Amino acid sequence: MITLRFAETAEEDIAFSVSPLLEAAHSWHVLTDPGHHALHVPWVRRCRRLPAALRRRMRGHDFVVADYIPALFESRAGDHDADFADQLAAVRGLPPALLAAELTRTLVDTTRHTGDDLVDDRATRDAVLTDYRTSDPSRAARLERILTDPLPVLDEALTVLEDYWDAAFAQEWERIEPSLYESITRSGARIAHHGLFPMLRTLAPQIRVDPGRRTLRLDRPHDHDISVTRDHLVTFTASHYVWPHVRVTCDAPWPLRI
């Protein structure tokens, strides 16, 4: 269970953002499992018109978005002046150990491993690789590449994402970005007139709000109990393509984000 605890200054301890890079990643995730994303069937159908070679490359690298969405896609997500290219540049500038941990999480059971444990602990890394070499050799090979040097793996995935952006999602972002800012404006108006907790109740059914205890809770297989303060804000990132999921980032060094 993830629990966020808000102070009396809750309205001052939150922020809102949009992110072209993160939204592109969410839309790529939709394409990995179209049947689970009924709202986005029109996008799935449009993407059938993408060049066949690009679609093959996207399938070949979709491990980066198929389940766990790496927090690296949130780089500069709170910077309203950062465009898609700026965010990609920020990702490419992240420390290799951090990249390796995030990419590793896309391939392992995140209820058992944090990614950092495979990067930092040779015994854990060797045990996981040995297991995958028997059960899933292709996964083992990809994981070993990431742990040896994450930069080529990252560059391959980001190049595919750039090509997907150029071929289709840049135009889609121009279409949906105004509506995302409109949703932020509506949320701001609710907060101004009714306070934070009535607004939180409008976000998603998975979010459980207790105004009396000043808490927000989400069911997750790992436990976090976090105090939201002015020095430790929570950012709500507006998204169209994240539905039906609620994505939460609450592990250091990443900013707290829903």
Image (tube, helix red, strand yellow):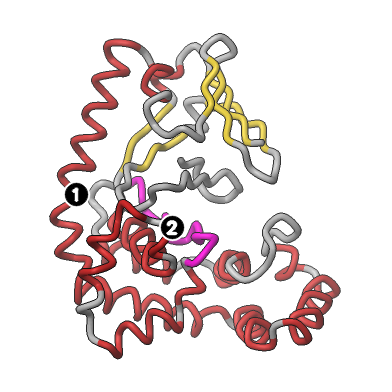
Q: Quadrant of residue 10?
A: top left
Of helix, strand and loop, which one carries label 2? Answer: helix
- What residue is shown with label 1? 177
> Is there CB contact under 8 Å for labels 1 and 2?
no
Image position, residue 98 (x, y; %) = 58, 65
* Residue at (34% x, 74% y) in the render: 161
Q: Which mark is residue 58?
A: none
* Residue at (28% x, 60% y) in the render: 41
Q: Residue furthest bottom?
A: 53
Please state which of residues 218 and 84 is positioned toward the viewer in this rendering. Answer: 218
For residue 244, side relative to residue 24 (left or right): right
* Badge 1 or badge 2: first in the primary sequence: 2
Where 141 sits versus 113, above or below?
below
Please state which of residues 51 and 38 is positioned toward the viewer in this rendering. Answer: 38
Q: Which residues are magenta?
A: 66-78
Is residue 76 part of the magenta span, yes or no? yes
Image position, residue 134 (x, y; %) = 78, 86
Please state which of residues 242 and 148 is positioned toward the viewer in this rendering. Answer: 242
Is residue 12 part of the magenta span, yes or no? no
Quadrant showing the N terminus: top right
Q: Name the mark nearer the viewer: 1 or 2.
A: 2
Assess disc 1: are there few (<14), some (14-19) or many (≥20) residues with their C-alpha within 10 Å of its C-alpha: some
Where 175 sits versus 118, above or below?
above
Of helix, strand and loop, which one carries label 1? Answer: helix
- Label 2 sits on what residue type? His
- What residue is shown with label 2? 36
